[in-house]
Every structure is written in structure tokens, then in C-alpha cells.
Image (cartoon, grey):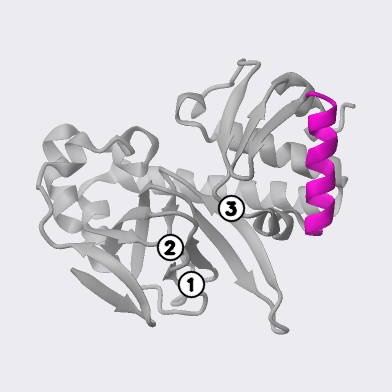
Amino acid sequence: MTAMIRGRPLIIDTHRDPNVCLHCQARPFSVCSVIDDADLQRLGAAAVTMTVQPGHSFIQEGGQAEHFFNVTAGTAKLYKLLPDGRRQVTGFAGVGYFLGLAVSASYAFSAEALEPVQVCRFSRAKLRELLDDFPALEKKLLEVASHELVVAQEQMLLLGRKTARERLASFLIARVKMLPHCMGQQTVATKERIDLPMTRMDIADYLGLTIETVSRTLSRLRAEKLIEIPNNSEIVVLKHTALDNIATGMT
């Protein structure tokens, strides 16, 4: 079925396979990984599956924080709006991200799909029941919240101290680490292909740069043979260590 949230269409699956969580490819990277196979059916029963089309939002800044969202496919852009209408992109949520851990009654950011995004939506009440019965899930969510704090601190460093070159290198290295085969371990590959579903303007907003600076810096990294740019939505990292050294200010 199709529903509307503030005029934005969402496709909601009301006919969930009770065993869908058991076969979910996002499970190893999400909070669901701490739930035993025998209990996954209950987890699936508590969730509503939604597909969000590109350009549409499933979280609205200032909206009532009634739900939590576990991203199982696609990429979403997280952003805040300033009073004068300017936008600050605060992050990009991919597979395994758990969104909506609000400390107040309203969401602190908006989330917009950059490509078809699939999420499992949990109401506050249903999630609270799950946390009461599965302490491991509550511990995992605490780890998620702690990780978000670390990411926020890294973003402050990136915007406050790093050069444009260091910012863009940091962004690319972070995208490499989000690849499924790199999650939870240090990558040593010398060549990694990363998808960029976001626009150059989105990247510029996230890094606190102009779109011209982003394009110019990418061109320079390509000229130095650190990356390849097959198209606007894809980049190949050729020299991971060299790029990482730039990101950390070692070169």
C-alpha cells in the first residue's frame, strides 16, 4: 500500500513474511544482529517495512518522534535547516543505520532518501517492549548512541580544523569503511569502488565547502592518481593508504 507523510509517498508492506528478518542481508550490520534466530519472528512482527522513494523524507526535523527506523537498503541524507533556509547535511545513513534515537519528543534532523531506501519502522511502544525482553538489544542501541557521539565529534573536527583536501579525503575513506566487506574491520585493499548516491552539492553541504571546491579537489586527487572517477555516482579509490594519510593530515 502507499501512505502519505506530510504529503510524501511511502510504500508500506502490510504483508510481511514473519521470517523476513531471518533472511535479511542487512542483519549482520544492524542492531538486529544481537537477536537470536529463535526470537527474530517477534522482532519482525513488531516492525513495519517501508520503501521510501528518492527525494522523499521519512523523518522530518521538528516532527513528533514517534518511530525508530532501521535502514536495510539504500542511502538516506540526514540534514538540518538553519532559520535562514540554509541546509547543513549532517550525515549519510546506509545499510545498518538505526535512526530516530531522539532525546526529546521531536526529531532533531530530517532524513531524505537519495535512492530507493528500505527501512523497518518500530513504534516507541513496541521497541520499548522489545528492549524489556531483550537486554542485548538495549546494550546494542547504547553502543549506537555512543558511536553517533563519536561521529559528531569527528564532524566537528572535520569542519573546524581540516583543509578542503583533508575533508574530502576523510569523506572518501569513510565511504570505503561503509562497504559491507569492510564493516567492523580495517581495510587493506589498495583499490575500492564506492558508490556516491548523493550529489556533489550534498557532499559540499556535508563538508562545509562550495561545490566548486569539491569538484576541483576531486579533480586534483584524480590527477595524482589516488582515485578514478568513472562517473558522478562512483569513485574508485586506487591508493587507500595515501588517501588515509591525507585525511589524517600526515601529508
Quadrant in the picture for residue 196:
top right
Q: Is residue 237 left or right of residue 73?
A: right
Side of 43 relative to 156 (left or right): left
* Element class at badge 2: loop
Q: Residue at x 49, y 57 (%)?
A: 114
Would you name the residue on which mark 1 appears?
107
Label at residue 100: 2
Q: Amino acid at mark 2?
A: Gly
* Kind of residue sitting beneath label 1: Tyr
In this view of the protein, can residue 166 be seen by the observer?
A: no
Q: Where 243 falls versus 99 (above or below)?
A: above
| Residue 127 horizontal/vertical position (percent) | 27, 59
Quadrant of the rendered image containing residue 249: top right
Residue 96 versus residue 92 in the image, above or below? above
Quadrant into which the N terminus falls: bottom left
**Whole-percent x and y of residue 203?**
68, 53
Magenta span dominant secondary structure:
helix
- Above or below — where is 39 with respect to 52? above
- Asked whether the residues under the numbered discs 3 and 1 touch, taking CB atoms below 8 Å apart as contact, a structural biologist would say no
Q: Secondary structure at mark 1?
A: loop
Q: Determine contact: label 2, label 1, CB under 8 Å.
A: yes
Compared with 88, 135 (above or below) is above
**Mark 3 belongs to which amino acid?**
Met
Residue 180 included in the magenta stretch of the image: no
Q: Nearer the viewer, residue 210 or 14?
A: 210
Q: Which residue is mark 3?
A: 198
| The magenta segment | 210-225
